[in-house]
Image: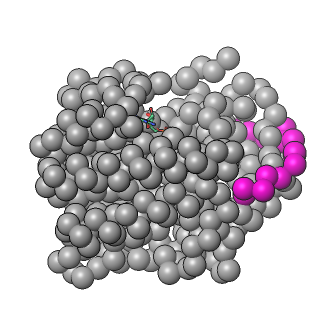
Amino acid sequence: MKALVIGGNGFIGYNLVNLLLKENHQVRIFDRYPNRFMPPLAEVENVTGDFSNHGEIAEAVRDVDWVFHLAYTTLPQTSNDDPVYDIRSNIADTVQLLQECVKNKVKKVVFISSGGTIYGVPQSAPISEDHPTDPICSYGITKLAIEKYLHLFHWLHGLEYVCARLSNPYGELQNPDAKQGAIGVFLGQIARHQPITIWGDGNVVRDYIYIGDTVKALLCAAQYDPAAVNGPRVFNVGFGEGHTLNQLVDAIKVVVGPQVEVRYTESRPVDVPVNVLDISRAKKYLGWQPEVTLEDGIGKSWQWINSLQLK
Ligand SMILES: NC(=O)c1ccc[n+]([C@@H]2O[C@H](COP(=O)([O-])OP(=O)(O)OC[C@H]3O[C@@H](n4cnc5c(N)ncnc54)[C@H](O)[C@@H]3O)[C@@H](O)[C@H]2O)c1
C-alpha cells in the first residue's frame, strides 16, 4: 500500500514509517520539520509542508491508499491556555484533510486520538471504549470532535477510518526535552545527572506502552476492515496495566541504578488521577496485543537515550 504519514517525522510517526517500510509499504511523509534525531530516509518521499495549508495537503493526499494523521498543534497541558487556537488549528484543518481524502478516494484514515484525555476522570478502571467521554482539557475535546467528524464523513461519504485512542507511548525517538512523556523526560534528566521532577505526590496512575507495540497497533488498524466484520472503528491502544509515577521511578531504578533523585512539585489540574485502558477490543478485532514489558521497554529507551550523549 502507499501511505501518507502526516507528522511522520515526529516520535510516533518516524517509528511508524520504519515499520511501514519494513513491511514493504510505500511511504510519503508530510511534516513541517525533519526528525530531530535521525536523518531523512532515502526510501521515503519527504514532503515539507504545513498541515494548515490546504493546497499542500491536497497535493500530499494524491494517490495514497492510507492516511495516518499524527500532526497536532497542542498538548493536553497547554491546550486549555488557548482553546480557540486548539479548535481552529486541529478541528478545522482535519476536516479540510478529510474532504481531500474523500476526493482522492483514500481507503483508510488512521487517526491518533487520546486514550489518556478523552475519558476525563474515570468512573472505573480499566477504561473501555464505552466509558463516558468528559475530557478535562481542550485537547481531549478536539480529539473527540475529530473522532465525530470521522464518523460523519464515513456516514456521508463512506470514508473508512479507525481511531486509535492511545495511552502513554514511550521509547526510541521520544524527545527527552519535550513537555510530555514521563519516561523520556525522566531518562533524559537522569542521563544529565539532574533530579527527576514529579508533579504531585507520584500516585498518579498511567498506562505506558512501548513505541514498537504502539506502531504495530497503528499498522493493524490500517489493515483492519471494519465493514467486513461489522466491527467498531474506535479502539483503545495501551498496555492495559497501570503504574503510579512512584512505581515507574522504581522500575527505572532497576534499569539505570539506584542513584536517582526525585523532587516533588505541585500537581497540575490537567492530570486525571488514574488512566488505564481496557484493550480487549483491540485484541479481538485488530488481532494485536502489546508484547514489550515496562522493564524491557525502559531498558531499550535507556540505551537509546545514552546513544544521544546528552550534556
Ligand atoms: N506522545 C504521546 O504521548 C501521545 C499520546 C496520545 C496521542 N498522541 C498523538 O499522537 C500524535 C503524534 O504525537 P507525537 O508524540 O509523535 O508528537 P511529535 O511532536 O513527536 O510529532 C508530531 C509531528 O507532527 C509535525 N507537525 C505538527 N504540526 C504540524 C503542522 N501544522 N504541519 C505539519 N507537520 C506538523 C511535527 O513537526 C512533528 O514532527 C499526535 O496527534 C498526538 O496528539 C501522542
Q: Is residue 22 above or below residue 103?
A: above
The magenta span reads: 255-271
Extreme residue in the top direction: 311
Residue at screen point 22% across, 81% down: 229
Compare residues 182 and 304 and report the one nearer the observer. Answer: 182
Q: Residue 39 in magenta?
A: no
Q: Is any atom of residue 1 visible in this view?
A: yes
Placement of 84 over or under 126, stated as above or below: above
**Location of residue 281 in the rendering, given as x and y in whole percent from the top left corner:** 41, 77
Q: Is residue 85 above or below residue 214?
A: above
Provide residue 49's location: percent of width, then percent of height. Answer: 33, 28
One can see residue 260 in this view: no
Q: State the residue in front, 130 or 296.
A: 130
Count of labels shown?
Answer: 0
Is residue 203 shown left or right of residue 210?
A: right
Q: Residue at x 42, y 42 (%)?
A: 71
